[in-house]
Image (cartoon, rainbow, N blue to C red):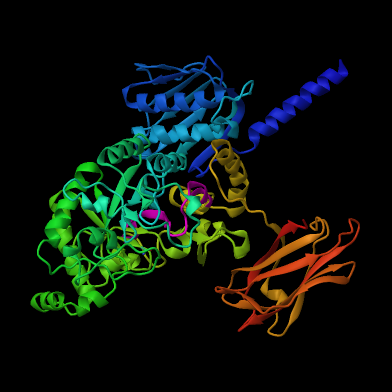
Amino acid sequence: MKSKTIVIICLFCAVTALALSPPALIPAPQKMELLEGRFSLGPDTRIYVDAASRETGNFLAAKLRQSTGYKFKVVTKYFSSQPVRDGILLTTKSAGTNLGPEGYELTVNTHSIVIRAPEPAGLFYGAQTLLQLLPPEIFSTKVVASFDWQMPCVQIADWPRFKWRGMMLDVARHFYDKPEVERLLDQMARYKLNRFHWHLVDDHGWRIEIKKYPKLTKVGAWRSGVGFNIDPKSTTAYGPDGRYGGFYTQADIREVVAYAAARHITIVPEIEMPGHSLAALAAYPQFGTGDGPFTIPLQGGVNPGIYSPAKDGTFQFLDNVLTEVFQLFPGQYIHVGGDEVPPGPWEKDAACQALMKREGLKTPAELESWFIRRIEKFVNANGKILIGWSEIASGGLAKNAVVMDWIGGGKEAAAAGHNVIMTPTGFCYFDYCQSLDRSLEPHGFAAYLPLRKVYSFEPIPADLTPPNDSYVLGGQANMWTEYVASTNHLEYMIFPRLDALAEVVWSPKESRNWEDFQQRLQVDEQRLDKLGVNHRHDNSVKLGEWTPSQLSSTNVTLEWDVTGKVQGPGQYRVTLNHDHGDKGLTIVSLALLENGHEMARDAHAGYTGIEQRKPVYVLDLPTFKPDAHYSLQANVRGEGGTDSYGSVGWVFVPKK
Ligand code: ACM
């Protein structure tokens, strides 16, 4: 009898402890209160919907069915706003209008669940949160038998910080087909992102069928090889003739647009001009600057193939292309690129020079602005809003244009009353690699963007004060694919950095907390695993930190006890990472000591600071003694001062 009581008490403790551990929601909600108790999802749980919530109700039932195997009955025409026992009610009735068009309230009690939102988008986001309250197994793509589908009782009120929460995918450099794009849209929806910027056109490929100009895809969608020094076997995007590429038919595009809309994602197509246009000009050279020929390259960089604003028919061609694009994409925005237009071709071209003279334009940047203004007139006349990269502002900004800031200009544009979307390279470029130790990363672009830096992104530029900060619509991750040709690699680059970006653009700035995020991320990585979505996992072991008080402008030895972190003989790849502070550290050498005796040393010259130079040190431990004391020593000096805060970690590569 006595032991039975103890068991009951302990079970109760365990359940209470479980109930009180905060759920791992990403992005974190605006307000969440944890309540006592848990709700159990069972085969008899029903979903109650009205007309406005029917779509989300069906979506939720289908998602829940995949892993639970339960055929949740969706009860339509439920017109009351009252919770139902053993039911999940989705309703727009009695929802606080202050939640906004994407906000929702979610209440989980022991016997009922209610999602209330003023608009369908909020209901959808409430359903996404509900899924994250359940164990990660809910994301399994196959039925998990005999599982206890419980979730903690909570009261959540949630809405986004920004209205533009985006992700850009470049399908021009490497082609991703319809199912691959839809797979990404599914993940975006999970993180409550709502803008998919589809980079459909670039030097390396034209990916959208345009009926009036069939050569755009017949010629422009294919190139002679995969290029970019990529293993040709890493992709299957080859045509019947063996050329690399692909494109979306207009029917494909309509399907993807509908797929995105069902997930409350608006697609923003990008049709690049006047630069990055070699694929179009390979097909229709008569609209290019100079005589051509224009060929699709197999390498990156800024290419000279640009449209000529001085040739008969160029604008007619672009207007005709845009007309078909407008018919396919119901969203308000059209992105027209405008980045990296090399000045040379227009400077050397007599007709362009004559045009500049006639229009009183002094520089190629002014000619570009003239070009964009001309296109904007057509865009606006069709009821759409033009977006362009930073450079569209260089020679004067078109009247109603939105600036997508990648290299500056966003702050100035917002201060002048233009809407802007912030995508600065140093925080939002997911083609950058995720570790300073390149040997541990796939083939890719040299720049470095770690998860923590994405998490520290602040979309409102410093010094941009109210009311002009309200012109910042939000932020976006940019996934350029020069070096990324497969879905597996693509997902590795995107996740978990998209977790961090999602929290930046959704959650309140004040509640951002790196340690807490890392805890929640452990659970989200399990969800990604269940979904079969590839992601990077940080395998490094944190060894310690340094602060300015330990540093000097002459050489000092920093030491960290690493006993217990040495796992066996093999390679210890140590990275010294300056986290913040104005100054950096010159690194003279690193050594691994066993009971005070040096076992391994790397003495190459390194530096860690805002810039990094070879901050990775390789220490080879030939043998391992389980009972020994191990320490890591770094000989370093502060460069130009001692204001450096940083951390040291390693990745262990066992001896084969
Ligand atoms: C860009 O990265 N060229 C916008």
- Residue at 50% x, 56% y: name it: 231
Q: In which quarter of the image is residue 102?
A: top left
Residue 123 position within the rendered picture, expressed as x and y whole percent measured from the top left? 40, 32
Q: Is residue 190 placed above or below 588 in the rendered structure?
A: above
Direction from residue 54 to residue 140 in the image, left or right: right
In the image, is residue 644 part of the stretch drawn in magenta?
A: no
Direction from residue 206 to residue 155 in the image, left or right: right
Q: Residue 471: tell me if it is visible.
A: no
Direction from residue 397 to residue 179 in the image, left or right: right
Residue 105 position within the rendered picture, expressed as x and y whole percent measured from the top left? 44, 33
Residue 337 versus residue 481: which sits nearer the camera?
481
Q: Quadrant of the C terminus?
A: bottom right
Residue 611 position within the rendered picture, expressed as x and y whole percent measured from the top left? 55, 74
Residue 59 versus residue 491: which sits nearer the camera?
491
Residue 382 position within the rendered picture, expressed as x and y whole percent measured from the top left? 14, 49
- Residue at 37% x, 44% y: name it: 194
Direction from residue 411 to residue 349 in the image, left or right: left
Ligand 1 position by quadrant: bottom left
Q: Quadrant of residue 15?
A: top right
Q: In which quarter of the image is the N terminus?
A: top right
Query: Which region of the structure is painted magenta?
Result: 468-492
In the image, is residue 471 part of the stretch drawn in magenta?
A: yes
Q: Residue 492: tell me if it is visible.
A: yes
Residue 157 versus residue 528: which sits nearer the camera?
528
How many numbered circles does the render carry?
A: 0
Residue 232 versus residue 355: which sits nearer the camera?
232
